[in-house]
Image (cartoon, rainbow, N blue to C red):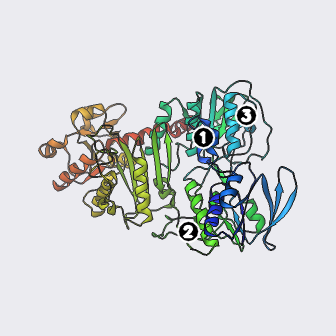
């Protein structure tokens, strides 16, 4: 059997090597248009930043090493320009000689990846992108002021997202060939367009190289897969290291060494220095060859494949970022997943695709597991990770959910080096199944998200997390692991032992007459407490009001609550209790409910409320609304 694979990076090369391990008799040909195969594309930002010092460390294999070890015919600088599915042939152009030839196949695997998207603003032809080794060479040349720093096609995926970010609509692709432009002096400033995973990584690494960096994102937050109260911690980390983060903003035009910024509606937002510009706004699946072959594409643009990665054309398969994935969390899906196609451009999924398609071609197995979009990124020592749906998407889909926030330490608090994480769990209130999870923190976040991703894959409920037996020693975790704690909270809510209210729901409750009670100590209360706009015309609030009608929480410490509740906490209206992270609030809510109060615990406590309200202030949305109101 002769298998031709188009594309020699993650999915394509995983397929090729798996095929050889399973069959010594197969004839395997890999056609790659670029100059390199099997390179570490996820490491490109870190080479640009000098974290990875040696360029050769990115080059995991060469055509020669693959031929020697696996007897695979790997041809770089060979672009497939046509597919004749009926004849089982592809037309191939040797980019070195310019000559074309026809290659036959018994099975064809398309692994072309995805193409970067660049906003169609004036001057954008000088923007660089980051898809392959040639792209990172151009970025390094531009940083160092060497020739070869001009624009050319490249880019990388935004993990966990299907849509581009940080760019004006409509979006276009760069042409495949653009002239290079030597730089006279090393770059001192940079603008990164797009605040997704790759954009954030690029921004951090340019700071490592000593550049003044502006990160421009069209949406109202960085890292769209996170919800705003989680993503704001990443923004704070970026700003603490000198990155100028501009959300609800886009690049309107590029000058020779500046970028003009505008709001989404085109209103001017100033000019920033931009010796170097990197566009990381997202990618589009490269479906050109699939269309030539007559294959169907999905509603979101990827090559439509079944659970065994077959396209609609016989003997033609598609894998990696160009292919659709089965959505394991689609509405109505159980642990086995659903057939609803989605796009999740992640390296781990691409490698899984490659292995799976090899097994299918050789008749070993069928049924690719649905995808849930597990992703992680590091930001100056902070870790942000996610799996599954976020709250924004669940609301958009109109699906019911229950949100849980916790703020545990990554290991025992008494052991040196303990630091706090922020975790968020999203749960189906009817089935108790896990719909998604997010985490941000210094240490231990990746471990917890991996456990939660495994729980999703295994069909565990949120309450099941309480009984997971996880490794424990003071240096590594807690006797009640943060994952167990999420399970305890989920089980309490499922059983109706307590009710919670989210940070963004609090104002509405207070407007309806609810009393907010801070059950922390007076010292904690004095350092900052929940403050919301109180009900209009309530003269009984007296000097508790601060500012323009802002109402701070009533402070009744938990240890004094039994004695003081009857005299100080009004009855006949809802009560919302809060502490720092939600744990003491739960104890207070249980106590007050047994005293006859209609009580809810503020989920995640003061810290989640603080992060959520901060996210609103810094997003740029409030500013835009104020400007619109002023113009009206």
Residue position for label 2:
368
Determine the residue positioned at 62% across, 49% down.
60
Q: Position of residue 344 (x, y in %)?
A: 58, 57
Q: In the rendering, at what x and y percent does residue 88 appear?
A: 78, 71
Pointers 1 and 2 in contact (C-beta within 8 Å)? no
For disc 3, the marked residue is 149
281 displayed left or right of 401: right
Snapshot quadrant of residue 308 = bottom right
**Which is nearer the eye, 577 or 184?**
184
Looking at the image, the residue that sits furthest to the top is 185
User: Who is closer to the viewer here, 58 or 392?
Assistant: 58
Disc 3 crowd rating (10 Å Cα; few below 14, some 14-19, many 20+) is many
User: Image check: 429 left or right of 498?
Assistant: right
User: What residue sits right under mark 1 in the picture?
Assistant: 45
Q: CA distance from mark 1 to mark 2?
A: 30 Å
**Of callouts 1 and 2, the N-terminal one:** 1
Q: How many dots with numbers?
A: 3
- Residue at screen point 71% across, 33% down: 254
Badge 2 marks a residue whose secondary structure is loop
Q: Which element carries disc 1, helix, strand or loop?
A: helix
In this rendered view, identify the residue nearer to me: 322 or 568: 322
Cβ–Cβ under 8 Å for marks 3 and 1: no
Drawn side of residue 334 relative to residue 138, left or right: left
| Residue located 32% across and 56% down the image | 470
User: Residues under labels 3 and 2: Cα distance?
Assistant: 41 Å
Give coordinates of residue 318: x percent, y percent.
Answer: 67, 65
């Amino acid at each position: 059997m002769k298998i031709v694979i188009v594309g020699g990076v993650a999915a394509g090369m995983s397929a090729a090597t798996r095929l050889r391990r399973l069959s010594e008799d197969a004839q395997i040909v890999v056609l790659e248009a670029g100059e390199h195969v099997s390179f570490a594309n996820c490491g490109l930002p870190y080479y640009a930043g000098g974290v990875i010092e040696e360029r050769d460390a990115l080059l995991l294999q060469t055509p020669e090493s693959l031929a020697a070890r696996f007897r695979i015919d790997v041809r770089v600088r060979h672009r497939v320009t046509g597919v004749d599915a009926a004849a089982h042939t592809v037309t191939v152009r040797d980019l070195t000689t310019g000559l074309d030839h026809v290659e036959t196949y018994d099975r064809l695997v398309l692994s072309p990846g995805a193409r970067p998207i660049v906003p169609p603003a004036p001057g954008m032809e000088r923007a660089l992108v980051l898809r392959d080794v040639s792209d990172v060479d151009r970025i390094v040349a531009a940083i160092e002021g060497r020739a070869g720093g001009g624009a050319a096609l490249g880019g990388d995926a935004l993990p966990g997202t299907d849509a581009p970010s940080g760019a004006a609509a409509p979006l276009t692709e760069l042409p495949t060939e653009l002239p290079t432009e030597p730089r006279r002096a090393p770059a001192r400033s940079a603008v990164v367009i797009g605040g997704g995973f790759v954009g954030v990584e690029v921004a951090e690494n340019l700071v490592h190289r000593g550049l003044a960096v502006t990160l421009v994102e069209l949406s109202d937050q960085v890292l769209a897969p996170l919800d705003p109260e989680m993503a704001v911690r990443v923004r704070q980390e970026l700003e603490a290291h000198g990155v100028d983060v501009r959300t609800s903003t886009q690049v309107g035009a590029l000058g020779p060494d500046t970028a003009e910024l505008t709001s989404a509606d085109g209103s001017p937002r100033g000019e920033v220095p931009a010796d170097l510009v990197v566009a990381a706004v997202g990618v589009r699946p490269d479906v050109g060859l699939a269309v030539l072959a007559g294959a169907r594409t999905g509603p979101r643009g990827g090559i439509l494949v079944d659970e065994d990665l077959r396209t609609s054309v016989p003997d033609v398969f598609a894998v990696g970022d160009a292919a659709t994935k089965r959505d394991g969390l689609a509405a109505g899906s159980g642990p086995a997943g659903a057939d609803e196609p989605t796009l999740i451009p992640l390296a781990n999924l691409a490698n899984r695709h490659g292995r799976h398609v090899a097994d299918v071609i050789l008749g070993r197995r069928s049924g690719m597991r649905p995808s849930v979009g597990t992703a992680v990124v590091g930001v100056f020592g902070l870790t942000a990770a996610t799996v599954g749906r976020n709250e924004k998407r669940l609301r958009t889909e109109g699906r019911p959910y229950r949100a849980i926030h916790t703020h545990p330490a990554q290991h025992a608090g008494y052991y040196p080096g303990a630091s706090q994480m922020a975790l968020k769990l999203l749960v189906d209130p009817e089935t108790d199944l896990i719909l998604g999870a997010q985490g941000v923190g210094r240490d231990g976040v990746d471990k917890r998200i991996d456990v939660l991703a495994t729980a999703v894959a295994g069909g565990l409920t949120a309450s099941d997390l309480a009984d997971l037996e996880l490794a424990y020693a003071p240096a590594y975790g807690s006797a009640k692991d943060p994952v167990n704690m999420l399970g305890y909270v989920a089980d309490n809510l499922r059983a109706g032992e307590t009710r919670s209210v989210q940070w963004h729901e609090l104002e509405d409750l207070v407007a309806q007459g609810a009393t907010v009670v801070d059950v922390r100590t007076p010292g904690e209360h004095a350092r900052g407490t929940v403050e919301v706009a109180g009900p209009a015309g309530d003269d009984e609030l007296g000097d508790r009001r601060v500012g323009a009608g802002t109402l701070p929480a009533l402070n009744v410490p938990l240890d004094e609550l039994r004695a003081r509740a009857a005299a100080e906490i009004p009855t006949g209206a809802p009560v919302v209790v809060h502490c720092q992270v939600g744990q003491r609030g739960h104890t207070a809510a249980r106590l007050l409910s047994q005293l006859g109060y209609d009580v809810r615990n503020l989920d995640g406590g003061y810290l989640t409320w603080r992060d959520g309200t901060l996210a609103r202030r810094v997003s740029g949305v409030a500013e835009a609304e104020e400007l619109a109101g002023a113009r009206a």
